[in-house]
Image (cartoon, rainbow, N blue to C red):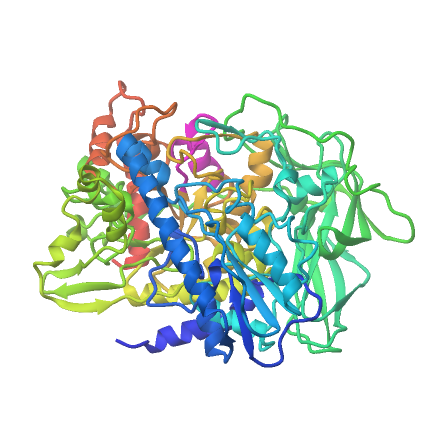
Amino acid sequence: MGLQTYEINHIERLRKLAPECMVLLKSDGSFPLEVPGKMALYGSGSRRTIKGGTGSGDVNVRAYTTIEQGLAKAGFNITTSDWLDAYDAVWEEEYKTFRAGLKAKIEAEGMSGLLETLGVAMPEPEYSIPLKGEGDTAVYVLARNSGEGADRKAEMGDMKLSAAEIRDILQLAEQYPKFLLVLNVGGVVDLSPVLERVKNILILSQLGISVGDSFADVLLGKAYPSGKLASTWAAWEDYCTVGDFGDLDDTRYREGIYVGYRYFDTVGNQPLFPFGFGLSYTAFSIEPGVPTMKGTKVTVPVTVRNTGAHRGKEVVQLYVSVPEGKLDQPYQVLAGFGKTRELAPGDKENLDICFEMEGLASYDEESSCRILEAGDYLLRLGNSSRNTEVVGTVCLEDTVELERVSHVGGTPDFRDWKPEGAKRGLGSIGISGERIAFHLSASAFTPVTYTAPKVDEEALALAKTLTDSELAYLCTGVFVDDETKYLIGNAGVTVAGAVGETTTLLRDKGIPNLVMSDGPAGLRLSRQYGLDEQGAYPLEAEEQEAFKELLPEALLNILLGIYPAAAGQNRNGEIREQNCTAIPVGTALAQSWNPAVCQECGDIVGEEMKRFGVHLWLAPAMNIHRNPLCGRNFEYFSEDPLISGKMAVGIILGAQKHPGCGATVKHFVCNNQETNRFNSNSAVSERALRDIYLRGFEIAIKEAAPLAVMSSYNLLNGEHTSQRHDLMEIVLREEWGFEGIVMSDWVPAGKPSVDDKKYPRACASGSIAAGNDIMMPGGRKHHEDLMNALNNEAVAYPLTRTNLEKCASRMIAMAWKLAGQ
């Protein structure tokens, strides 16, 4: 079957959007090229282009365009096919050795070894292949992959460049008059060994299905990069080492609020490229106007003019230096931003960069209040965190208690680190010369009030008529007797390849089931499935061949059991396709600094949800880039909670504009590493939790009202997030007014356990008792746990009938909302 109309439409839309996600780091004016010609193409990502990371963040597409293919289609004569062939041979041999090592580890360690190797990406192999391409233009595409289940390493071939990469990149920079280093990566790579001598560097990122075509458009000037960094890029040695990362049991976030640019700007460490940085094919001037204030809303008018010779878009960023008083503060925080429309040479646009003062509040643990302290709030305008000027000041006369909240999240066994000296990193906090100042008193602020979430009385009434067992079924994902398949992320029964569903057992009582698809780079479904009189059935699982190759037979049988591929062999139904579209990864979307781009991507996915019968998309993923080694950073947006929240708002609004479709923000909360992800404890102060890690979720929920939230695997200060009543009920529902459902991440039920961990996995009874409405992906052991805990004070997490009715009624209401009564 050829490309269908919707596929063509989605690919073309993404091809036009993708350049907004590309970040031009260095330029000497050699690019764009005027016409296609001879191209010397090198690097791992040229032919093995990565559209997106591995694991649940992957999308099973019909096909996508690689860099080599995109350049060839654009008319380039690739003169290095021999080099690419030779590299492929090296890669294949290295990959055999790599997979053999993983298999040996799994054979020796069983389930523990499997869990520790899921998502592990092979480091870039060393090689020695002569550089003999023809032409005066060369492109080296450096690629890095990562994914769910494993973190990256600060080693050569991963976070750091390999020796072969350093050698070839430097040689190409000398050999070719025009040389472009292209980064086909989902996260930071330490470029310090080559940075000085390479004059043109582009972060292509991982852009989904149109990656190769979009790159060709940018190389030829048919489009242009207009992205900015959403996370700081630095040499590995310069990142903050105050807190732990990747510890097996307890990871202590000792750095507190000093994450990303908040750390670099405050202590004065010079990154390779700062937060918010990005060049263009053209140049811009940014002329601030006179700031204004209405109530507590600050507006800085800006005129942006294209002063160069090419079309382009510019991003204007507004930072604020918050005064220190009782609480220490970073040098500055992002408060607002805006992106221009396309500006032709000589064209200009007037933007208003706005923010509410309330958005600058900090959490005071002692009083359990969000506060704004008295003093001068300096407004800093520019186009990166290291290129700003002060344009005004808000003088707050009195300290304001904006909101008194509950103590949540528990208490770690340490005090947060604080930098020595107040805001010493970028020089004096004061300024000289004229400035616009506003005086603001506490009376300008409106006290925060809470409105209790609505209870669907009809759904609750139905829940009260159900048996205990039926309520427990509603609070676990759908399951059948064979539960062994669920660990590999394909627990759906209605839609082939869906990651999970709610129970199908209560349809006769007017409760339809909900289908969930993984994300966040698009829907992750089986490309092909069979359909006969018995309904839809899967064919070969996308992952099955990889598992067969990797796992010893005994473990393969445990995981796959009678995996549905076997069932398909005995059925002769019509073969159908589900071709989904891979959108740019989360980090790439954040680099657009444009919520409208995110909204259009969400709209594309929403259209496919309607087409394939998916009700809940497990996206957006919005954990903070706390450390560049997190294996799932490519799925997440940024090191900054404002950018994370605003980009998530765009995704949610785009997807949920389609009736019957809901977005699921995840992973709630502090899921910032993959090492020991089922059993890892994130130890975080309440201030860091409130000001950094919860803030993006708060923005997304208050501004876009997602229909679902997914709790995370990890523990928070000694208790699983799904089992924390303070997170599930107090923060989400009482403080933020969330009215959707909360699901767990995919916690295996009744699987062979790993007994050598300090902390246990989350359990169904503890999660439902806390207000986590449904335990996914489901399984008989989850159901049995709920039934055993019901009215049983002897268990660790006793349940009441009221607990079950409350969670089940929310599931019923959501089923009615999305799937109809």
Q: Pick the quarter of the image with the C terminus.
A: bottom left
Question: In screen coordinates, is 568 left or right of 420?
Answer: left
Does 714 lie within the magenta span?
A: yes
Provide residue 481's location: percent of width, then percent of height. Answer: 14, 42
Q: Residue drawn at (72%, 41%), measured in percent from left and top?
A: 269
Closer to us: 240 or 418? 240
Question: In screen coordinates, is 616 left or right of 131?
Answer: left
Instruction: Classify 306 as above or below 203.
Output: below
Question: In screen coordinates, is 562 left or right of 724?
Answer: left
Question: In screen coordinates, is 455 left or right of 37?
Answer: left
- Can residue 460 be seen? no
Provide residue 202's location: percent of width, then percent of height. Answer: 60, 62
- The residue range painted magenta reads 711-732
Outermost residue, top direction? 794
Instruction: Classify 225 as above or below 248.
Output: below
Outermost residue, left direction? 570
Outermost residue, right direction? 433
Where residue 326 sits, quadrant-wise, is top right
Closer to us: 153 or 377? 153
Does 413 lie within the magenta span?
A: no
Closer to us: 547 or 411? 547
Where residue 299 sits, quadrant-wise, is bottom right
Where residue 279 sits, quadrant-wise, is bottom right
Q: Pick the quarter of the image with the N terminus.
A: bottom left
Closer to us: 227 or 412? 227
Provide residue 738's location: percent of width, then percent of height. Answer: 45, 46
Number of disc labels: 0
